[in-house]
Image (spheres, rainbow, N blue to C red):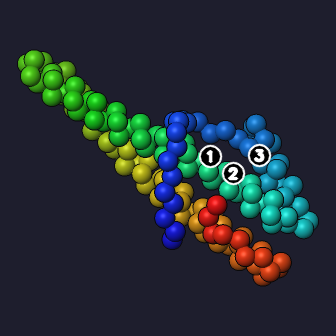
Amino acid sequence: MTTISRYYNNLKFFRTYIGGSKKKEINLFLNAQGDQIDWFEFRKLVILNFEDVLHVTFSRKFATKRLSFWFLGISFCMILFKLSILAFICLGLALISQIFFNYFKYREGKNIMNYDIIIRFTNNFIQQEFGINLPDIT
């Protein structure tokens, strides 16, 4: 599996579909797969799709990690001010945020693995059919 290191300048929490809607995105994929699959178009659509999915997953992972630290800090401040009930509530929220962080971290790894498999498959097929060597990850 190839490791993908990405840095995004802005956070994005929801998908942006390729054609503007989920239905148009599905139609674009179906058109690329028609009777004769246009492998170059299919590869381009897959890259756009997975980049968007990875950006959303990374943003959610980043936000939940920061949220967990904030709740943990607030919890310790509440302990210092002897507000134990609020401290336990914030500690619970920090724990829930950490659970979501681990979930998004798992999803990110799973998405990267799926991305890598599909890109390798399309690159191998393009190389066999057309004799063109494309990079594994663009």
- x and y, in percent, of residue 108 in the image: 48, 53
Q: Secondary structure at mark 3?
A: helix
Whether residue 43 is visible, yes or no, is yes
Say few, some or many: other residues with alpha carbon within 10 Å of mark 1 (under 14 / 14 to 19 / 20 or more): some
- Give the left or right position of residue 112, taking residue 49 as reference: left
Q: Which quadrant of the structure image shows residue 117?
A: bottom right
Q: What residue lies at 77% left-to-right and 46% top-to-bottom?
A: 25
Q: Quick one: 81 or 132, which is closer to the camera? A: 132
Q: What residue lies at 51% left-to-right and 36% top-to-bottom?
A: 11
Q: Which residue is mark 2?
A: 48
Q: Amino acid at mark 1?
A: Asp
- The answer to whether the residues at label 1 and label 2 have Cβ atoms under 8 Å apart is yes
Q: Quick one: 55 or 75, which is closer to the camera? A: 55
- The answer to whether the residues at label 1 and label 3 have Cβ atoms under 8 Å apart is no
Q: Which residue is mark 3?
A: 25
Q: Secondary structure at mark 1?
A: helix
Q: Secondary structure at mark 2?
A: helix
Observer-side mark, 1 or 3, equals 1
- Give the left or right position of residue 6, taking residue 73 as reference: right
Whether residue 94 is visible, yes or no, is no
Question: Mark 1 to mark 3: distance in Å?
Answer: 12 Å
- x and y, in percent, of residue 81 in the image: 10, 17
Location of the C terminus (image quadrant): bottom right
Q: Which residue is mark 1?
A: 52
- x and y, in percent, of residue 125 in the image: 75, 76
Q: Give residue 125's mark.
A: none
